[in-house]
Amino acid sequence: MTFRACILNSVSKPSQATAEKFSLEEQNRDNYLSCQAHNWPVVEVITIIHSRDCLWLHEILRDCPPFAHLVSLIESGAIDLIVVRHYDRLWSNSSLQGQMSALCRQHKVQIFAILQPKEPIDPALLPRRPGLQGIMESLSGVLRDEEQNIRVARRAVGMEKRIIKGEHVWGPTTAYGFTRQDKALVVDESEWRWLEEMKRWVLEDGLGASGIEARLNRLGVPPPGAKRQSTPTRHGRWTRKTIKRILCNPLYAGITRWGNFSNDGQHRALFTAEEQARVLAVVSGPSARQGVYDDRLLSGLARCGYCGHAMSYCHSFGARYLRCSWHTNTRGAECQNNGHAAAAVHAYLLEAIYHASQDRDDWLAARRAQHDSAQIRERISAIEAQIREHQAAFARWSSAFEVGLIGLNELAAHRARILGGVEALKGERQTHTMRLDSESQALGAMEELSPGMEGLADQTVAEQRVVLVRLVERVDLVQGQPPAIHWR
């Protein structure tokens, strides 16, 4: 009988799929030769680069699309046979083996392992019980479980002995600030200097992770992994999570640790135990919020040009963005996805402020267009008319109370509502009144700040923010348009 075969080649991680390993290539070659020898037509070849050590089938279906595709072929009746080099290419434990075996039996799909071959039979003749084939499949899962348990136990013994000797426990990467040399950790001076800077910024300047993140990114310091991999961490930027992980790592206090085992290491320490405790207190305490404006120049000033709500800062793939807070807080139900790269908005704004300081006439013209005296006076008159209407309304409610049409509680409710409206209108009137004489104040602020404008782009964000809040009332952001600056 001719069986429609699906060839399955798999490894557990990308490093096993490299050209020098030849694992996938060998599996594919052997599986093809077996299909040719049996005259089985190959319907599809599936390659999986993912661990098959899952307890539940739905986990691997969710995380590994090629495996999900294999299951869809089984369930749709598109194949009769799965050809693998060994059963462990399909599963790595008895739990997944049981679920996959049951799925295959349900859809009359057989598994042919070329290293443990058992010839397939006509699907119509398959017994209801798994029989010898099921025993072989079950044993493969159980043996793989036991093999994994032995491997883990041996590794634990080896790691414990390394820790006792003070040696570093090797992982997929080396800790930031170090390189490997034989069995020792050797300091990488190009990275170690930034570790010392972080230590100084925390202990002397009181900066938390946010402030350190902003400084390192502003200085263009390569993050961990930038020299070791083609795609650096978080697209080449430091993150608060990375900084906290480094500062809280006992490795930098001279301790090697694995699981419950720890000992004094044989590598250079960045902190004493006391210093690291102080660092942890700063990073996790109230001072961790210091420096929060290091890269939040427009906090409280940026507004969504669509709905008028504040724009909030957020991370996306390691970069800082300004997004409409109303859209974010309502999970997309209100406004729209109004996002802008924070660095680009900051650069545009600083450039506009510098040009305003160089060309006062152009700046004053733009400012006067926003602070139209006639419109402001018209608005003040409208506000005063509204205040008089509120006062007249309260007088009518008072008269109704005096003649007994309403009670005291209802009068108090109307009074609170009307007075609240009047206070809001008075506040708006005061703001507009101040705008009528604000040009002289704006000119004075510009005159005072102009001497430092030449180096504005090179100042710290805290210094730039001082300039910004003196000159700018708000910045409206609309997708696809340059920021609209409203001058004070």
Image (cartoon, rainbow, N blue to C red):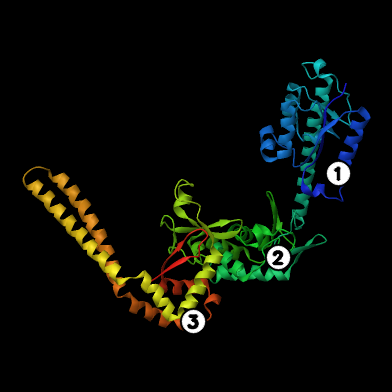
Q: Is residue 61 visible?
A: yes
Percent position of residue 318, x then y: 61, 58
- Assess disc 2: are there few (<14), some (14-19) or many (≥20) residues with their C-alpha within 10 Å of its C-alpha: many
Q: In this picture, is 24 found above or below 284?
A: above
Label 1: state its secondary structure. helix
Between the residue at mark 3 and the residue at mark 1, the CA separation in whole angstroms equals 64 Å
Front-most of 480 and 321? 480
Q: Does residue 11 appear left or right of residue 396 in this picture?
A: right
Residue ID for mark 2 = 177
Q: Amino acid at mark 3?
A: Gly
**Which label belongs to residue 209?**
none
Dot in front, 2 or 1: 1
- Assess disc 3: are there few (<14), some (14-19) or many (≥20) residues with their C-alpha within 10 Å of its C-alpha: few
Q: Amino acid at mark 2?
A: Gly
Q: Which is more N-terminal, label 2 or label 3?
A: 2
Between the residue at mark 2 and the residue at mark 1, the CA separation in whole angstroms equals 34 Å
Q: Residue at x 34, y 70 (%)?
A: 371
Residue ID for mark 3 = 452
Label 2: state its secondary structure. loop
Quarter of the image where one finds residue 251: bottom right
Label 3: state its secondary structure. helix
Q: Residue at x 74, y 68 (%)?
A: 188
Which quadrant: the N terminus? top right
